[in-house]
């Protein structure tokens, strides 16, 4: 499996090696040891989420308070998605910037994003995405930024008509969230990552 760093520090694109034969295809979707080589610590999976979306659905930008936040490992088991990783860490050199990866059942790529990064998912074709999460869902620590924030300016697929949940539509902009003091800091995220590396050696 090939693990490639994205432009946002702490995020990776994972492309598995596929083994087709006359029965179908086999691939390793997740390898904790290979991922740990890139991260410096093992990802502990404490929850899995299954997200079924219609074409046009735009989910995010979601993030969680640090600590503990949630690292995520996301892949598609059906359909086609564009996965966006957004740097929401105050003090980061790429603060407010993003990178993206197409998730589908052809290349079967996955995206890993570390704690403190923002995540959005645009569904191009009806499909299902599976999330492996490092922490269980904590509603009191979950937060969001509007995915239509012009400062962040996510590049949506051509002709894409976004369908947002009421919660995502009402989410603050990056500037509003920063002014409210709800964004994670780069310092807090790095300290949390160091603590994980120390705990899981």
Image: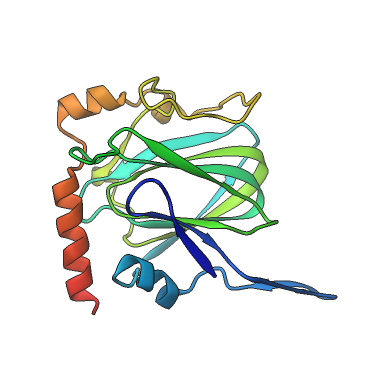
Q: How is the image coloured?
A: rainbow
Q: Is residue 140 above or below residue 26?
A: above
Which quadrant holds the N terminus? bottom right
Q: Position of residue 150 (x, y in %)?
A: 40, 20
Front-lying residue, 12 or 47: 12
Q: Position of residue 38 (x, y in %)?
A: 37, 67
Q: Position of residue 110 (x, y in %)?
A: 53, 57
Write the residue at 49% across / 42% down: 100
Write the residue at 82% across / 75% down: 23
Which quadrant holds the C terminus? bottom left
Write the residue at 29% across / 71% down: 41
Q: Is residue 29 above or below residue 149?
A: below
Q: How many marks?
A: 0
Q: Is residue 32 above or below residue 143?
A: below
Q: Quadrant of residue 171?
A: top left
Q: Is 38 situated left or right of 125 in this image?
A: left
- Asked if residue 45 can be seen in this view, the reply is no
Q: Is 168 situated left or right of 28 in this image?
A: left
Residue extending farthest to the right is: 22
Residue extending farthest to the top is: 150
Q: Is 19 situated left or right of 62 in this image?
A: right
Q: Is 21 situated left or right of 161 in this image?
A: right
Write the residue at 29% across / 70% down: 40
Q: Is residue 125 above or below residue 77?
A: above
- Asked if residue 95 can be seen in this view, the reply is yes
Q: Quadrant of residue 153?
A: top left
Q: Position of residue 113 (x, y in %)?
A: 38, 53
Q: Quadrant of residue 140?
A: top left
């Amino acid at each position: 499996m090939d693990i490639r760093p994205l432009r946002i520090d702490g995020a990776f694109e994972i492309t598995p090696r596929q083994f087709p034969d006359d029965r179908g295809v086999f691939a390793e979707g997740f390898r904790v040891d290979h991922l740990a080589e890139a991260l410096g610590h093992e990802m502990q999976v404490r929850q899995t989420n299954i997200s079924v979306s219609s074409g046009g659905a735009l989910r995010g930008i979601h993030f969680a308070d640090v600590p503990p936040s949630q690292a995520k490992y996301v892949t598609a088991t059906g359909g086609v998605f564009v996965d966006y990783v957004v740097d929401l860490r105050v003090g980061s050199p790429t603060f407010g910037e993003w990178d993206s990866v197409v998730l589908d059942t052809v290349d079967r790529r996955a995206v890993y994003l570390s704690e403190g990064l923002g995540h959005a998912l645009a569904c191009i074709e009806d499909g299902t995405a599976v999330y492996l999460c490092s922490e269980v869902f904590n509603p009191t620590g979950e937060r969001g930024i509007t995915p239509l924030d012009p400062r962040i300016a996510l590049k949506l697929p051509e002709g894409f008509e976004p369908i947002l949940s009421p919660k995502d539509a009402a989410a603050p902009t990056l500037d509003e969230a920063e002014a409210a003091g709800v964004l994670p800091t780069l310092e807090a995220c790095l300290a949390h990552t160091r603590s994980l590396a120390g705990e899981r050696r």
